[in-house]
Amino acid sequence: MDELILSRIQFAAITSYHFLFVPLTLGLGVLVAINVLVYSLLAISLSTKAAESSSQLRDDFQPLYCP
């Protein structure tokens, strides 16, 4: 094969790789950041709810019937 054809094939491969994977990586990074933020906010709110109602949960707890 000619040198020019090989360099064009290489350029096409690298360009398509960058066209696909760079936006994918950036998008997944944003998605992970949003998921971590939501998880952190939910964990904080759930832990404060659990701390407030832990005594009520102990009082309302009824064990399952086990013969």
Image (tube, rainbow, N blue to C red):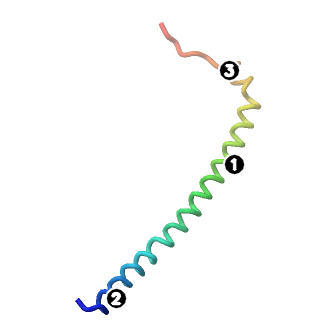
Specify the label residue 66 is tagged with: none
51 is higher (above) or lower (below) than 65: below
17 is higher (above) or lower (below) than 35: below
- Find disc 1 in the rendering and name its residue: 41
- The front one of 53 and 1 is 1
Q: Position of residue 64 (x, y in %)?
A: 54, 16
Q: Which three-letter amino acid code belongs to the residue tagged 3? A: Asp
- Find disc 2 in the rendering and name its residue: 8
Distance from the alpha carbon under mark 2 to that under mark 3: 72 Å
Q: Is residue 39 left or right of residue 25?
A: right
Distance from the alpha carbon under mark 2 to that under mark 1: 50 Å
- The front one of 4 and 33 is 4
Q: Residue furthest right?
A: 52
Instruction: Determine which quarter of the picture holds residue 1.
Output: bottom left
Q: Which three-letter amino acid code belongs to the residue tagged 1? A: Leu
Distance from the alpha carbon under mark 1 to that under mark 3: 27 Å
Q: Which three-letter amino acid code belongs to the residue tagged 2? A: Arg
| Residue shown at 71% from the left, 43% from the top | 44
